[in-house]
């Protein structure tokens, strides 16, 4: 095996290794300490919960994934449009940006009662919460990508006689793509956070509902199972975004030899 | 790498026009970036540049040479005075000028060939015909790359090329649409001495072939004397033109020739003048 291949293998196995070590520590702590398993179950018990409630967990997880993705794609569309507008025009920037910061500072949990009042209980408030969390990083990054175009690049374009929209299409958008994809990785995980928060308060389906129901029955193993499912889903979605990023903006990875 | 300069015929028609009215005319141009503080960057600069002429502007650093470029291309309006290009007063950015900066500013998401094609997607009439004449445009960009010795690198991305190669590609992009005017803002300043001298030859070859008008801003006096028909020396801020020097050396000029006494004398003369300007 070539050394470079071996190094890569080691690197790729690191997260799995670390996870295994953490699980082992967890198992040892719960086996040796006298904390009640009713409030701190062992990994084996959590595994048992997966076994017993497998199909229910799958149903709820699917629901959470769908809500999160709807919220995420809405945030993506709105984020790109508003981000481009903010980045392209100093006027829109100075008008909209402070409002965006103000909106982002509001804890989204505080908005939930409003969403429920307006849309009732179910998918809609979850989508809205996911959207409101995922939206901000996308807007900010797209705007940053546009606003940091090298002035020389713009001079070259203007001296050729390019119109503003041509500069936007040929320079602005390609340049902000790596920024956009970096934002997507953050946004997709935030979308999961948003939909689960909403589900714990106002829904009949989803991982959040499952966890609330489990905790009210003191089935702590199932609560842990829910947490693990959310984490795994978010990591998977993050990975997909990373793959898309590498394909679409490969040129931005040159420093890392991609 | 070197172009076969000996075989290049100088186009007769353009040669005749060169003596006619100036292609670019600056008439006591003044510029203050901030009109309130009254600090002038340029103070009453007048220049006349013929069609097909290659001029260089040298001066102490920070004297406003780059500002001059922006004024001529209309990217910046003068505070007073006026600028005409091709008998038309410059108001906004004039179209279809080729530009090359010290930083190659190639787009990292485009291959080198696609970078060279960029002007053909923007400048008329190429833009109109770009679907119909796609193959012809590609051939033209490829020919440009071959002229500077980058024929085999069209499919590479700019960040896979060395600094000198990037700057060659940059020159290709600046010239592919056959602009009548080329603006060079220290395009070779970031390169090592050998690559720089090699690119002087490339630049001269392209100019002898196409005879566009060119304005070169540079710190390097040898570069100015090597490339230009006339050299303008600017004073420190507020910048004025303190010397205009014709370079009567025959073309094509060579790096070897830049060590000949008549070449060195001119460089000395310019150097002395800049020394005065700095004090």
Image: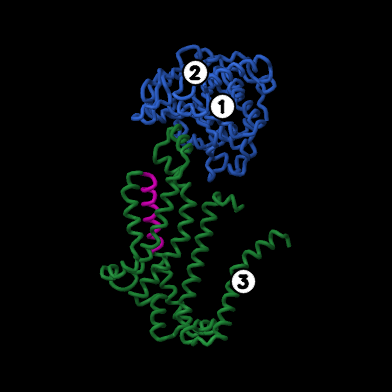
Q: Which mark is residue B51?
A: 2
Q: Please, which colouring scheme is shown?
A: by chain
> Is disc 1 in the same subunit as disc 3?
no
Q: Which chain is blue?
A: B
Of discs 1 and 3, which sits in the foreground?
Answer: 1
Q: Provide residue B97's location: percent of width, then percent of height.
A: 47, 28
Q: Which residue is mark 3?
A: A17
The residue segment tinted magenta is A71-89
Percent across and percent down for residue B80 are 36, 22
Dots 2 and 1 on the same chain: yes
Q: Measure the C-alpha gap from mark 1 to mark 3.
A: 58 Å
Question: Which sits earlier in the primary sequence, circle 2 or circle 1?
Answer: 2
Separation of disc 2 and disc 3 at Cα?
Answer: 71 Å
Question: On what subunit does the disc labeled 2 rest?
Answer: B
- Secondary structure beneath dot 2 equals loop
Task: Measuring from the top left, give residue A25's x and y in whole percent.
Answer: 58, 78
């Amino acid at each position: 095996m070539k050394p470079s291949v071996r190094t890569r293998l080691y690197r790729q196995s690191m997260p799995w290794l670390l996870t295994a070590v953490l699980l082992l520590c967890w198992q040892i702590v719960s086996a040796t300490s006298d904390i009640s398993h009713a409030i701190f179950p062992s990994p084996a018990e959590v595994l048992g919960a997966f076994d017993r409630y497998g199909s229910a967990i799958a149903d709820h997880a699917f629901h959470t994934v769908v809500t999160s993705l709807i919220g995420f794609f809405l945030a993506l569309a709105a984020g790109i449009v508003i981000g481009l507008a903010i980045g392209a025009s100093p006027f829109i920037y100075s008008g909209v940006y402070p409002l965006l910061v103000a909106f982002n500072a509001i804890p989204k949990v505080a908005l939930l009662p409003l969403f429920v009042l307006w849309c009732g209980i179910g998918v809609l408030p979850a989508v809205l919460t996911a959207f409101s969390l995922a939206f901000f990083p996308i807007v900010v990054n797209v705007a940053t990508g546009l606003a940091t175009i090298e002035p020389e690049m713009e001079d070259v374009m203007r001296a050729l006689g390019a119109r503003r929209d041509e500069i936007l299409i040929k320079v602005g958008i390609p340049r902000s793509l790596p920024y956009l994809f970096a934002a997507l990785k953050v946004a997709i995980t935030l979308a999961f956070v948003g939909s689960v928060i909403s589900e714990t308060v106002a829904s009949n389906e989803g991982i959040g509902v499952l966890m609330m129901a489990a905790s009210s029955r003191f089935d702590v193993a199932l609560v842990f199972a829910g947490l693990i499912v959310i984490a795994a889903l978010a990591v998977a979605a993050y990975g997909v975004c990373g793959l898309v990023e590498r394909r679409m903006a490969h040129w931005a990875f040159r420093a890392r030899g991609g | 790498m070197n172009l076969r300069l000996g075989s290049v015929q100088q186009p007769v028609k353009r040669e005749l026009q060169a003596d006619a009215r100036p292609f670019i005319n600056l008439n006591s141009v003044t510029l203050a970036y901030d009109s309130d503080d009254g600090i002038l960057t340029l103070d009453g600069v007048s220049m006349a540049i013929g069609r097909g002429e290659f001029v260089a502007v040298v001066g102490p650093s920070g004297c406003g040479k780059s500002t001059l470029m922006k004024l001529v291309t209309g990217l910046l309006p003068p505070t007073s005075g006026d600028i005409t290009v091709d008998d038309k007063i410059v108001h906004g950015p004039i179209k279809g000028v080729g530009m090359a900066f010290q930083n190659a500013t190639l787009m990292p998401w485009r291959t080198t060939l696609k970078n060279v094609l960029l002007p053909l997607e923007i400048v008329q009439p190429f833009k109109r015909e770009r679907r119909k004449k796609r193959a012809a445009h590609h051939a033209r960009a490829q020919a440009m790359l071959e002229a500077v010795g980058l024929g085999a690198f069209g499919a590479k991305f700019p960040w896979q090329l060395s600094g000198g190669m990037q700057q060659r590609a940059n020159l290709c992009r600046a010239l592919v649409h056959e602009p009548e005017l080329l603006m060079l803002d220290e395009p070779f300043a970031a390169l090592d001495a050998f690559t720089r001298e090699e690119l002087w030859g490339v630049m001269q070859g392209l100019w002898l072939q196409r005879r566009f008008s060119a304005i070169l801003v540079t710190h390097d006096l040898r570069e100015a004397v090597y490339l230009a028909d006339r050299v303008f020396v600017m004073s420190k801020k507020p910048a004025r033109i303190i010397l205009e020097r014709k370079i009567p050396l025959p073309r094509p000029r060579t790096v070897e020739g830049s060590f000949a006494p008549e070449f060195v004398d001119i460089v000395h003369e310019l150097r002395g003048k800049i020394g005065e300007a700095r004090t």
